Amino acid sequence: MMQLKDEFAQLKVELDALQSEQAQQRQNIELRLTDCSVKISRLSALVSDDLRLNPSTTTALVGLGLILNYLSAYFIGPYIQLVPSGVCFILLLVITLTGFALSIKLPLQ
């Protein structure tokens, strides 16, 4: 009977040690996530400040996005033939109209 109590006490100590280790790991993960979110927030603030101060950066990013949209629409249409040519033409038309609207709205240099 005494041996069972000793084994039970030993198992309880091991369980407490495992729970403590698990709590420590959880706390480390929470600290890492908090640190990561702070860094992302700082990066976001820097990028948004840069985009406000340098409209040419914004214009370049919009231009890059339009170019990538054109390439994607072309490749899914006539080149790879995932969508019919009519749908591809409509996509290219929408991209062109979006680019035109953005060129009016954004300050260009």
Image: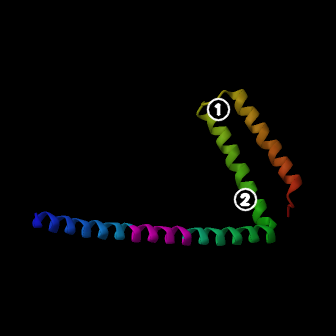
Image point (70%, 33%), residue name: 88
Where is residue 70? Give x, y as percent. Answer: 70, 44
What predominant SS class does the magenta segment belong to?
Answer: helix
Q: Does the magenta-highlighted stretch encompass residue 56?
A: no
Is residue 5 rendered to the left or right of residue 52? Answer: left
User: Tag 2: residue type?
Assistant: Leu
Image point (67%, 38%), residue name: 74
Judging depth in this view, the residue of 107 and 43 nearest the camera is 43
State which quarter of the image contains the C terminus: bottom right
Q: In the image, is residue 106 above or below residue 100? A: below
Q: Please give the range of residues in magenta.
A: 23-35
Image point (50%, 68%), residue name: 30
Tell me, yes or no, whether the two marked residues, 1 and 2, touch with CB atoms within 8 Å. Answer: no
Is residue 67 rendered to the left or right of residue 75? Answer: right
Residue named by callout 2: 61
User: Tag 1: residue type?
Assistant: Pro
Q: In the image, is residue 109 above or below residue 74? A: below
Where is residue 55? Give x, y as percent. Answer: 81, 66
Q: Residues within 10 Å of mark 1 (few under 14, many from 20)?
A: some
Residue named by callout 1: 78
Image point (65%, 33%), residue name: 77
Q: In the image, is residue 101 above or below residue 78? A: below
State which quarter of the image contains the N terminus: bottom left
Dividing the picture into quadrants, the one containing residue 63 is bottom right
